Image: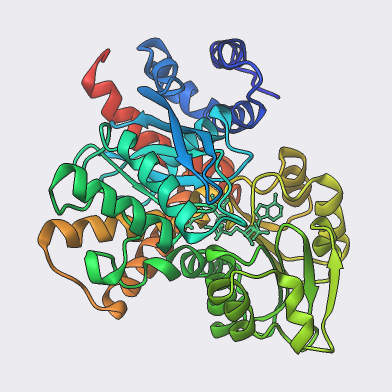
Amino acid sequence: MSIKNEKLAKVMEDVIKRNPGEPEFHQAVAEVLESLEPVVEKRPEFLEKGVIDMLVEPERIIKFRVPWVDDQGNVQVNRGFRVQYNSAIGPYKGGLRFHPSVYEGIIKFLGFEQIFKNSLTGLPIGGGKGGSDFDPKGKSDGEVMRFCQSFMMELSKYIGADTDVPAGDIGVGAREIGYMYGMYKKQRDEFTGVLTGKGLTYGGSLARKEATGFGLCYFTDAMLKDHGLSFDGKTVVISGSGNVAIYAAQKATELGGKVVAMSDSNGYVYDANGIDLAEVKQIKEVRRGRIKEYVDTHKDAVYTEGCSGIWGIKCDIALPCATQNEINEESAKKLVANGVIAVAEGANMPSTPEAIHTFQSNQVLFAPAKASNAGGVTTSALEMSQNSMRYSWTFEEVDAKLQGIMVNIYKNASAAAKEYGMEGNLVAGANIAGFLKVANSMLAFGVV
Ligand code: NDP
């Protein structure tokens, strides 16, 4: 860590002391605080009036038991979390993650990042995140339903359309949102937009499913164009094959790129002819299968066990869309050695700090998740607007708003980086632009 400002360094020291054993959370806070050094030089009141001390501490953390009965009649107990991090500019907003790796530190890191991402969208949404260590993989529909119902029975006490509006994330897709929304509606007896990512028949927004992946490509396209480049004719490698990865692959292809590799948590496929996305959708969205099944129907493609090898494939554009810290320094060096020109994060914090440093010091265009994957929450906020209006926009209307917002996020992050003397550094630019709106609001509220 290299925070030079003494007071900021002290905030970071306290964060580490008060949140032991949460390295992902420390990593996320350190990155933001480092970016804020030039801001607090210009605006010392953010430190003097305690805004930064308040900002790093979540407003509320809810932690609860989630008991459910499996298909064999055994009682299973998982742990649920909701971190209501910051509501300075709107109701808490952020996804729910169901994955065995979930613990309080992961949810805090994601919730903290969400504050700045949501602010960057320009829409009135605060930051939050939640989830459970439940693993939907290998569970029957009945088991997933009973888990989701139990989870929502407790969570419903703390959320609401104007207070906290969760959405999906890893392990939480349309099926899980449906089960949770059904239970919320039954318990509260109200039809309200308390979750986003809902099905189209009960208040969902067109283009929500596609939003994060499409948004990632709109952002990347804006970044490329600003440097006289485009997706056209470029080779693209995408990690993951979930919601974000699939729709990033679709839009990258529509913009003229050729996606040659995708992965899941077991391994990756390389198809020099270009990935057949219809087949990936069939495997992942319809059959809930494994990416290795791709080679059963595509004999020229090659499947390799293990995840990190995907970054050794030669490409022009890399879009990490699986999970946190999936690109380390070694992988980043391989990408650079193979001539990568742009890396844009679809997943949350997929690059380690050393990897980011490697990209930036080798003049690779680097788009940080906070800015480049904000398309999901943007469209979630558009879903909230449609629910409040009791009205639905067309796919084209939502997609056009999404595209406009992603281009604006690029412009704002880029302008903030320039204003604070770090031209081209979108990590700093996104942190600063996201921070200012929240911090100015907190300053107006006083000590609350
Ligand atoms: P999904 O659950 O739909 O897909 C996740 C994908 O990543 C799967 O292919 C999964 O493989 C793979 N994966 C998960 N863990 C690992 C791991 N440890 N190593 C390698 N691969 C892994 O999730 P999403 O696509 O929704 O989310 C992906 C990322 O994007 C996350 O970081 C999420 O926080 C972020 N994000 C998602 C948004 C959204 O709208 N969905 C919005 C903004 C950010 P497998 O099937 O084997 O588990």
Residue at 38% x, 54% y: name it. Answer: 377
Q: Give the tally of numbered discs.
A: 0
List x then y, in percent, for residue 375. Answer: 43, 60
Q: Is residue 418 left or right of residue 118?
A: right
List x then y, in percent, for residue 186. Answer: 20, 49
Q: Quadrant location of residue 133?
A: top right
Q: How is the image coloured?
A: rainbow
Residue at 64% x, 31% y: name it. Answer: 27
Quadrant of the rendered image holding ligand 1: bottom right
Q: Is residue 357 left or right of residue 158?
A: right
Q: Compared with residue 332, is residue 390 higher up or lower down, i.e. above or below? A: below
Which quadrant of the figure contains the N terminus? top right
Which quadrant of the figure contains the C terminus? top left
Residue at 78% x, 73% y: name it. Answer: 269
Residue at 80% x, 84% y: name it. Answer: 272
Foreground residue among 421 and 80: 80
Q: Compared with residue 389, is residue 281 higher up or lower down, i.e. above or below? A: below
Foreground residue among 217 and 224: 217
Could you tell me if residue 223 is visible in this image?
A: no
List x then y, in percent, for residue 329. Answer: 82, 45
List x then y, in percent, for residue 218. Answer: 48, 69
Q: Quadrant location of residue 252?
A: bottom right
Foreground residue among 169 and 405: 169
| Residue found farthest to the front | 73
Q: Compared with residue 368, is residue 8 higher up or lower down, i.e. above or below? A: above
Q: Compared with residue 280, is residue 181 higher up or lower down, i.e. above or below? A: above
Could you tell me if residue 109 is visible in this image?
A: yes
